[in-house]
Amino acid sequence: MPLHSAEPPAAARPTATSGSSGSGVPPLPAAAPRVNPIIGLGDPAGAARIRPPHHRLADDPVPADVAYQVVSDELMRDGNARLNLATFVTTWMEPQAARLMAESADKNMIDKDEYPQTAAIEQRCVAILGDLWHAPDPHRVVGCSTTGSSEAGVLAGLALKRRWAARHGIGPGGGGPDRVPNLVMGADVQVCWEKFCRYWDVEPRIVPMEGDRFHLDAATAAAACDANTIGVVAVLGSTFDGSYEPVAGICAALDALAAGGGPDVPVHVDGASGAMVAPFLDPELEWDFRLPRVASINTSGHKYGLVYPGVGWVLWRDTDALPHELVFDVNYLGGSMPTFALNFSRPGSEVIAQYYNFFRLGRQGYRQVQQAARDVATSLSASIEQMAQFRLLTRGDELPVFAFTTGDDVRGWDVFAVSRRLRERGWQVPAYTFPEHREDLAVLRVVCRNGFTRDLAESFLDDLRAVVRELDADARSIGGGAATGATMSGPSAFRH
Ligand SMILES: Cc1ncc(COP(=O)(O)O)c(C=O)c1O
């Protein structure tokens, strides 16, 4: 089945497609006009005839101002990004950064020969991250920008798979039924890891949650490994609740496994969020290349790297950790260019914006921004803990992200109803159930990011309290969910 249906329903097809007046404005369509007449250039009535295309191109162009205004107006229907407490992705940057991004949107990241300065800036970012993550030898660290952590994770997974195959002398045809590679990870991993496994024929060996253990721990990780394990993914900052997985403990358990004659399994750290938080707020925590078993690390520049969406990073501790046959030397526009990427062309803007942030903020600036987010998260979670209706799962003292659920005494409504009512007030807060073994647990999650200020947090808290009062009152008025068996609930999307 195609992902998109190209053919619109007959009734929805554009009608204003022929007989142009010559001014770029098509004649009046049979259906009612959709565009505010005020938007016209010289001729207000002309603009009223324009209908934005939904399914197929109109024959004629429209004035640029009209196209801008119509598309911009349409976007008003999206949620307000600053009130989106669901996403980890940056929703505010300084105007100077936005300007630089607009200025570099026309540079193709892959075209390193044509834009050598953009390529040099990408390399500087890799070096800066290598230093931040304690690469033992800054000259041997290798890495690249990606479109996000998903692509970064796939590249890291491919390197792990290739190294495992090389260790066992397995060629491109695979190793047969006894040699199916597996990747060990906790049930809290983001979907990109399951995607990697499915697309690249790797068994996802997912360690389920158990009781109050909501992520991978040292013992369960080591126990899941065998000779076909290509690696263990340790997540620095679970998408589910913001908690750090114990990377050092996992590495120690794998050291012991190897020392005891078991498989020697490398670790990849998915630091989509945490790799840009821990270096500034938890400098003593050993989770990175200080641990010899950590082969590679990814992060999303567009999460706590503080860049608008479209940039991730992946680094390998040294050239041995990235099999050289995965790197393509492309002869492109007269230059020889090593690349390791799933895609080809993409704009230079996000990498430039990443470098802007590195330059603008320095260590101290990043520390202040991340500390502010953690302060908001911990004080907001503490206030929510005071509310009798809720129980905290995490406090926002690792990632500035916390999850909470309803207390045992709550009757007649659930986290899904809270999420829906908050949405009515403009806040986007996802409600979702935990995976296998803890599907009984439904939570709300709040992601505190740069730009979610104390003021906004206070107004969120006021709204949360009001929502809970309403839900309690509604539950009482319908006789209490416990008595009737009814629970006010509602759908909610779980977004990253
Ligand atoms: C731990 C983790 N890994 C990977 C990803 C995927 O990141 P991206 O959106 O940058 O592809 C996410 C997104 O939330 C995440 O939280």
Image: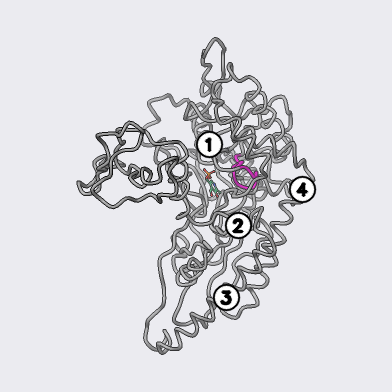
The disc, 1 or 4, on the residue closer to the chain's N-terminal end is 1
Frontmost of labels 1 and 4 is: 1
Residue interval drawn in magenta: 298-307
Q: Circle 2 sits on which residue?
A: 242
Q: Looking at numbered disc 3 in the image, what kind of residue is underneath it?
A: Phe
Q: Are marks 1 and 4 in contact (CB under 8 Å)?
A: no
SS under mark 1: loop
Q: Position of residue 338 (x, y in %)?
A: 56, 19
Q: Circle 4 sits on which residue?
A: 283
Q: Circle 3 sits on which residue?
A: 390
SS under mark 4: loop
Q: Are marks 4 and 2 in contact (CB under 8 Å)?
A: no
Relative placement, left or right, of 53 versus 346 is left
The disc, 1 or 2, on the residue closer to the chain's N-terminal end is 1
Q: Position of residue 430 (x, y in %)?
A: 50, 62
Q: Looking at numbered disc 1 in the image, what kind of residue is underneath it?
A: Thr
Q: Circle 1 sits on which residue?
A: 147
Q: Looking at numbered disc 2 in the image, what kind of residue is underneath it?
A: Gly
Task: Please tell me which residue is depicted at 40% across the width and 49% down the height of the picture.
Answer: 37
Relative placement, left or right, of 493 versus 360 is left
Q: Are marks 3 and 2 in contact (CB under 8 Å)?
A: no
State the image quarter where residue 214 is shown. bottom right
